[in-house]
Amino acid sequence: MQPNLKVADLARALDVSEYRISRVMKEHLQARNFNHYVNRLRIEHARHILAQPQYQHWPVLVVGMESGFASVGPFNRAFKQFTGLTPNQYRLQTVGSVQVSASASG
């Protein structure tokens, strides 16, 4: 969730080449590149936050920053790329289905 994380940072921390990390990402993690993989993890984290009723008061910007994005624009674009929805649409869809399920089981 570290903002501005680069493949060079990971390569330095693991003491391996950037090329090796990129190759592993493509061959074993089904990622187009390092940024694609990191954004996929960040979006999964954001989806979890957006689906939780206790975080409904958090603005989308806060969810994005908590997920490692530096600003709301890149967060919205990445979220829509991976889910087909904006963060607000996703929140409304998931919270609405949780509320309907809870009232149907009660």
Image (cartoon, grey):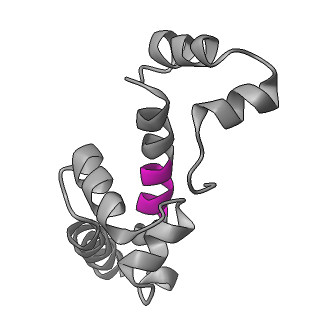
**Which of the 4 image quarters holds residue 57?**
bottom left
- Residue 18 in percent (x, y) is at 62, 19
Answer with the quarter of the image where residue 92 lies.
bottom left
Q: Which residues are magenta?
A: 42-48
Q: Nearer the viewer, residue 99 or 92?
A: 92
> Residue at position x 51%, y 56% from top?
45
Q: Residue 65 placed where, x, y %?
A: 51, 69
Q: Main secondary structure of the magenta part?
A: helix
Query: What count of labels does the image hold?
Result: 0
Q: Is residue 91 visible?
A: yes
Q: Nearer the viewer, residue 48 or 63?
A: 63
Side of 24 where 103 appears, left or right: left
Where, quadrant-wise, is the N terminus in this rendering?
Answer: bottom right
Q: Residue at x 22, y 69 (%)?
A: 93
In the rendered structure, the answer to whether residue 105 lies left or right of residue 12 reads left
Residue 85: give x, y in percent of width and height.
19, 58
Answer whether residue 45 is magenta in the image. yes
66 lies above or below 60: above
